[in-house]
Image (cartoon, coloured by chain):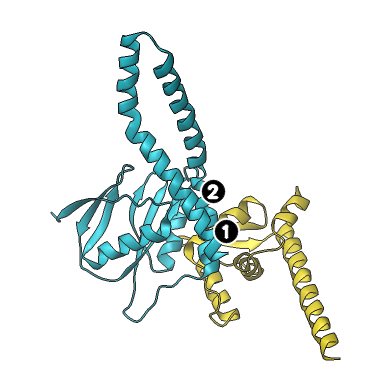
């Protein structure tokens, strides 16, 4: 089951990646959007539809969990499985970056 | 009591790009969506004319009251108000400032189509059922010798034809949208 989830989320969409990353600390949908906007210098703005759809799916898949409700906002946090999926994705990105650098360096030499 | 206008529009929500643009255009003319029926009829309420961005959310299965509140609250955080909810469809709108360009990225559009596609894949099933039904009717037309039975079948076929047209229209719109996304936005 867990392996299947890891496969489904790899490679991950940018929105899903930032949502998981921003949920390393408890946060709500709108907070995630603000943080993502800051991290990407306004390049990625997640729409409410994408946010709702992704949060619902991730909660169902066990990547995040509901913590509490603050006014009408739902606060979530990443789960252990979510951490593993995020780490796998981060390693994939690091590998991509390293490969690109190596190819460019070889081209220059 | 506010003024209400009825309008037929044959754009289906599955073609969400055109459908949301249609609702925004109506709002520019001073008409806000009040409700819609499944057979293309829309009711608009007189409102202040202005630039609004419309967003539609559809669900495959009914959502709980709690999920519904969570959805509305999330949209509210983004500056949207719920203007109509019919069945599994939710319609939101947000005021757009004059200089603000409400452009969605290709990534956002693709993610929205992925969600919509999961919901509207029901058209494929309906289309298959409609084809089966049509083949059965045709077979009976060609083989039946009982005039009373034939008359009943013709009446039944005529009565069901608006539903069949709606199913075919829905399926074609679904295929067109899918093709558009595969060719233009991928």
Q: Residue furthest front?
A: B142
Name the residue: 43% across, 63% down: B75
> Which of A41/B134 is in front?
B134
**Residue B103 versus residue B57 in the image, above or below:** below
Q: Is residue B77 visible?
A: yes
Q: Is residue B78 left or right of residue B150?
A: right
Q: Residue furthest top?
A: B146
Displayed quadrant of residue B170: top left
Q: Is residue B93 left or right of residue A68?
A: left
- SS of the residue under disc 2: helix
Distance between the alpha carbons at the discs numbered 2 and 1: 17 Å
Q: Position of residue A52 (x, y in %)?
A: 52, 59
Name the residue: 47% across, 53% down: B176
Q: Is residue B93 left or right of residue A82?
A: left
> Which of B140/A4 is in front?
B140
Image chain in yellow: A
Image chain in cyan: B
Q: Which residue is mark 1?
A: A55
Q: Position of residue B66 (x, y in %)?
A: 47, 50
> Can you say which quadrant of the picture contains the C terminus of chain A?
bottom right
Q: How many marks?
A: 2
């Amino acid at each position: 089951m867990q392996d299947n989830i890891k496969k489904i989320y790899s490679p991950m969409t940018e929105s899903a990646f930032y949502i998981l990353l921003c949920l390393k600390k408890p946060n709500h949908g709108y907070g995630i959007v603000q943080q993502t906007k800051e991290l990407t210098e306004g390049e990625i703005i997640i729409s409410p539809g994408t946010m709702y759809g992704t949060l619902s799916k991730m909660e169902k898949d066990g990547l995040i969990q509901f913590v509490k409700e603050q006014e009408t906002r739902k606060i979530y946090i990443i789960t252990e499985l979510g951490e593993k999926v995020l780490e796998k994705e981060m390693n994939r990105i690091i590998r991509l970056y390293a490969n690109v650098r190596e190819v460019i360096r070889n081209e220059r030499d | 009591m506010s003024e209400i206008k009825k309008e037929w529009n044959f754009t289906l929500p599955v073609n969400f790009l055109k459908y949301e643009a249609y609702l925004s255009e109506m709002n520019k003319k001073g008409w806000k969506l009040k409700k819609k029926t499944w057979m293309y009829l829309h009711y608009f309420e007189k409102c202040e004319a202005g630039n609004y961005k419309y967003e539609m959310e559809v669900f495959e299965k009914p959502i709980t009251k709690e999920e519904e509140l969570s959805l509305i609250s999330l949209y509210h955080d983004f500056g949207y108000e719920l203007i109509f909810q019919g069945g599994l469809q939710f319609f939101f709108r947000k005021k757009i400032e004059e200089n603000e360009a409400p452009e969605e990225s290709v990534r956002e559009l693709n993610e929205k189509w992925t969600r919509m596609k999961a919901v509207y894949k029901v058209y494929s099933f309906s289309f298959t059922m409609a084809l089966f039904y049509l083949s059965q009717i045709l077979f009976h037309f060609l083989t039946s010798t009982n005039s009373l039975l034939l008359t009943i079948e013709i009446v039944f076929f005529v009565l069901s034809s608006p539903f069949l047209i709606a199913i075919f229209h829905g399926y074609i719109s679904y295929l067109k949208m899918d093709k558009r996304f595969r060719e233009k936005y991928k």
